[in-house]
Image (cartoon, rainbow, N blue to C red):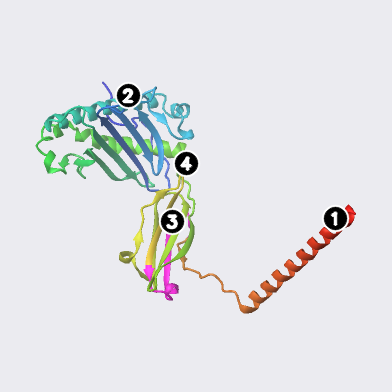
Amino acid sequence: MEPRPLLLLLSGALALTETWAGPHTLRILSTLLSGPGRGKNRYISIGFVDDTEAGLLDSGAPSRRLEPRVPWLEKQRVEREDPHLWDRQSFISRQSEQILRAALNHLRAHYKESEDVPHTHQDMTGCVVGSDGRLLRRYSHLAYDSTEYVALNDDLRSWTVTNTKAEITWRNLIPNLDADLWREILEDQCRRWLHIILKMGKETLLRADPPKTQVTHHPTSDHEVTLRCWALGFYPADITLTWQRDGEDLTQDMELVDTRPAGDGTFQKWAAVAVPPGQEQSYTCRVEHAGLPEPLTLRWEPPPRKSGTTVGIAAALGLLVAAVAGAAVAAAVTWRRKRSV
């Protein structure tokens, strides 16, 4: 029997006998590019475990095979866990490419579009697993030119068309998307894949780096200042920043940016709130993260003011240093002139 088509997910029989601090997430993003130029019919598939890019298959690469993106997932180590796993996953990825290609051609034909017009067809499949190995959430979404058109239902037994323009187009195709296959993958193989990855990469994936935090002060007008609460250098990416005034949450009134990768394997985020000048001390930022033993409460601390005495002493010391330096220079010039006589 040929392997059933699915991207990057395991089929090895590995018992789940350990528990991990969780939850943990597996996401697989597959993209088929179609159109003129070098990118025509290029297929790229990336597998993420939590926030770490674990595997990549690029049809434009010389090998056209699934390749590890982290050193602890190199092929030899994987084969010690399952001798046939890496080759099988490369083969399954190529089958998935064929499925996406057929779907893209189907849509392009329906809309009577030329092969020279660039298009993308994407699949996002994933699952969330708890610390006890129990599946908490499963999902699969398909998109054409970045617009989702069909999604797997929560019962994992049927699909729902999410774009009404595609309903007629996909009426004949959806039955060929085997929901039973996706359910089998998401309920069984997805969990096994995560187990092996967490086992091999636990030093990286199971770490918890606490955020470096601070509150900065930014005057915006005579009537308003912005307080910005920063969290930098943290892992994993899940973090909560909440501004409060006198203990009351200001979730609706604050500006919150998406969590962003810092480029070194950690993440950064900030939350801002506008406040009246002079009332900054009434506002606090609460930070919650797995790397912190308990939530942090931050408040903007104004810089210390220099007293008049301190300023006077500093000025006097400056004059004294200048006088001493000037005398030293004059003495050196005099000594040099005497040496030259």
Real-space Cα separation, disc 1 to disc 4, in angstroms:
70 Å
**Label 1 is placed on what type of residue?**
Arg
Give me the disc on residue 33.
none
Boundaries of the magenta span: 274-293
Sequence order check, earlier mark of 3 and 2: 2
Sequence order check, earlier mark of 1 and 3: 3
Give me the disc on residue 289.
3
Query: Is 280 positioned to the left or the right of 189 in the image?
Result: right
- Which residue is painted at 44% across and 54% down in the image? 290
Q: Relative to residue 95, is residue 237 depicted above or below? A: below
**Label 3 is placed on what type of residue?**
His
Q: Nearer the viewer, residue 22 or 146?
A: 146
Real-space Cα separation, disc 2 to disc 4, in angstroms:
27 Å
Most extreme residue toward the bottom is: 308
Give the SS element for disc 3: strand
Q: Is residue 278 magenta?
A: yes
Q: Is residue 190 magenta?
A: no
Identify residue for label 2.
Answer: 91
Query: Is 299 positioned to the left or the right of 312 in the image?
Result: left
Q: Cβ–Cβ below 8 Å for labels 2 and 4?
A: no
Real-space Cα separation, disc 1 to disc 2, in angstroms:
84 Å
Depth check, mark 2 against mark 4: the one in front is 2
Give me the disc on residue 336.
1
**Label 2 is placed on what type of residue?**
Phe
